[in-house]
């Protein structure tokens, strides 16, 4: 249990540092804003207590808010994502049950499942984040375009990161 907590903490640090040191400084244009740090929340073990997932998500979002100067918008988006996570997990549940010791990774659940699960939660996160950022429906379709393109970029980066650094992660 302590070893698993240590692994999750290191994964959390890895994704936060990756986001604030590398991804934040990528200039991909106004429509591509990948947020690879949310993989730290997506990859949490299935059996983890819901309250702990919410606290981890809020803390993760708050840390990113400090670096991006976004005044709690990432904290709100991450917390909502964590709140919806159990329902999304139930919706995409395999025919049997989830392995209680597994994490949400391509290696443990497969690419198709990961695309569905992560894609849904990424789009939820980005929708909340970008519409809070706009705080208006004036540019609804422009913001929606940004949500979709940034979501695709985020999903690709998360899958790439998992394949490079977390091949055998369970």
Image (tube, rainbow, N blue to C red):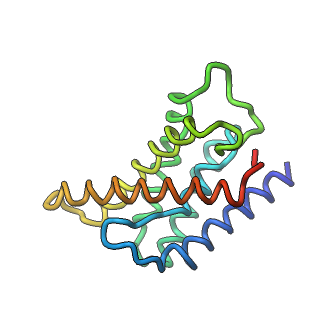
Looking at the image, how many numbered discs can be counted on the residues?
A: 0
The spot of residue 5 in percent (x, y) is: 78, 54
The spot of residue 153 in percent (x, y) is: 44, 59
Q: Quadrant of residue 163?
A: bottom right
Considering depth in this image, is 72 or 92 the residue closer to the camera? 92
Q: Quadrant of residue 58?
A: bottom right
**Residue 55 at least partly seen:** no
Q: Measured along the vertical axis of the image, is residue 19 above or below residue 36?
A: below
The spot of residue 110 in percent (x, y) is: 63, 37
Considering depth in this image, is 26 or 8 the residue closer to the camera? 26
The spot of residue 77 in percent (x, y) is: 43, 56
Q: Measured along the vertical axis of the image, is residue 46 above or below residue 60?
A: above
Give the residue displayed 19% in from the left and 54% down from the top: 141
**Residue 121 at least partly seen:** yes
Q: Quadrant of the C terminus?
A: top right
Give the residue displayed 65% in from the left and 45% down from the top: 105
Give the residue displayed 54% in from the left and 58% down from the top: 38
Residue 61 shown left or right of residue 151 in the figure? right
The outermost residue toward the left is 138
Give the residue displayed 68% in from the left and 29% down from the top: 98
Q: Quadrant of residue 128?
A: bottom left
Residue 113 shown left or right of residue 153 in the figure? right
Considering depth in this image, is 133 or 102 the residue closer to the camera? 102
Residue 71 shown left or right of residue 140 in the figure? right
The outermost residue toward the top is 95
Q: Measured along the vertical axis of the image, is residue 109 above or below residue 44?
A: above
């Amino acid at each position: 249990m302590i070893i698993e907590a240590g692994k999750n903490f290191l994964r959390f640090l890895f994704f936060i540092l990756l986001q604030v040191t590398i991804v934040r400084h990528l200039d991909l244009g106004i429509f591509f804003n990948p947020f690879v740090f949310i993989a730290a929340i997506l990859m949490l073990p299935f059996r983890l207590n819901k309250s702990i997932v919410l606290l981890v998500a809020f803390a993760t979002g708050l840390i990113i808010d400090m670096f991006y100067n976004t005044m709690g918008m990432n904290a709100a988006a991450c917390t909502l994502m964590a709140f919806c996570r159990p329902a999304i997990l139930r919706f995409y549940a395999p025919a049997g049950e989830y392995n209680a010791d597994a994490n949400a990774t391509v290696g443990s659940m497969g690419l198709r499942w990961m695309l569905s699960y992560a894609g849904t939660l990424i789009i939820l996160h980005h929708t909340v984040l970008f519409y809070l950022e706009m705080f208006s429906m004036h540019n609804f379709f422009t913001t929606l375009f940004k949500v979709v393109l940034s979501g695709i970029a985020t999903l690709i980066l998360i899958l790439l990161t998992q394949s490079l650094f977390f091949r055998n992660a369970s």
